Structure formats: structure tokens, C-alpha cells
């Protein structure tokens, strides 16, 4: 059985971010964020989280490049 929200999970994993980082920016604690991912999220909510991951990944890239 495949876990729900695989696209979000994969994007977090591939970006090297931690769940707590995404949860913090999303405005919930990491435990609640993990529980939220147990069931498939509505598209609107998914888009918001995917945008947060992209944003954090961009900030991470800037920090690694010394900007």
C-alpha cells in the first residue's frame, strides 16, 4: 500500500529539507504536519505546501552559495 502525498514526501526528501522545516513555514508543528500527510490532501493545500518546499529549497541554495 502506497503512502498518501508521495509527491510532497518525495520533494521534501529530494530537496534535503526536514519535515520540521516545512511544517514551521506552513504554521504547524512537525507532529501535526506528519499526521496531515497520512491522508491525501486537497489540491489547494498540496500546492501551498509544494510552494513552501520550493521556496525553502531556494533559500537553502542561496545559503550554500554564500548569498
Image (cartoon, rainbow, N blue to C red):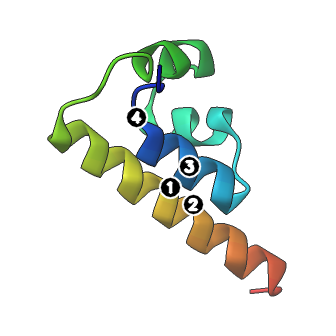
- In this view of the protein, which residue sits in the foreground, 37 or 29? 37
Distance from the alpha carbon under mark 4 to that under mark 1:
14 Å
How many angstroms separate mark 4 from mark 3 (CA)?
A: 9 Å
**For the residues carrying marks 4 and 2, which lies nearer the camera in this image?**
4
User: Residue tagged by mark 1?
Assistant: 53
Q: Is residue 58 above or below residue 24?
A: below
Instruction: Report how far apart the C-alphas of labels 1 and 2 lie in the structure.
Output: 5 Å
In front: label 3 or label 1: 3
- Secondary structure, mark 2, is helix
Query: Quadrant location of the C terminus?
Result: bottom right
Pointer 1: residues within 10 angstroms few (<14), some, or many (20+)? many
Precedes in sequence: disc 4 or disc 3: 4
Left/right of residue 10 with respect to residue 38 in the rendered view: right
In primary-sequence order, the first of circles 4 and 2 is 4
| Residue marked by disc 2 | 56
Direction front: furthest residue = 1
- Determine the image quadrant of residue 14: bottom right
Look at the numbered discs 4 and 3 and tell me whether their residues touch, using CB distance below 8 Å.
no
Residue 5 numbered tag: 4
Residue plotted at (69% across, 51% down): 17
Q: Are marks 4 and 2 in contact (CB under 8 Å)?
A: no
From the top left corner, tell me how far across and down residue 11 is, in percent.
54, 54
Q: Which residue is mark 3?
A: 10
* Image quadrant assignment for residue 63: bottom right
Label 4 to label 2: alpha-carbon separation: 19 Å
Where's residue 33, x and y in %? 50, 22
Q: Which element carries disc 1, helix, strand or loop?
A: helix
The answer to whether residue 31 is above or below residue 33 is above
Amino acid at each position: 500500500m502506497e503512502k498518501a502525498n508521495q509527491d510532497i514526501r518525495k520533494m521534501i526528501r529530494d530537496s534535503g529539507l526536514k519535515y520540521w522545516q516545512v511544517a514551521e513555514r506552513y504554521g504547524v508543528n512537525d507532529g501535526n504536519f506528519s499526521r496531515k500527510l497520512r491522508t491525501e490532501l486537497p489540491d489547494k493545500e498540496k500546492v501551498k505546501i509544494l510552494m513552501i518546499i520550493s521556496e525553502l529549497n531556494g533559500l537553502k541554495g542561496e545559503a550554500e552559495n554564500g548569498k
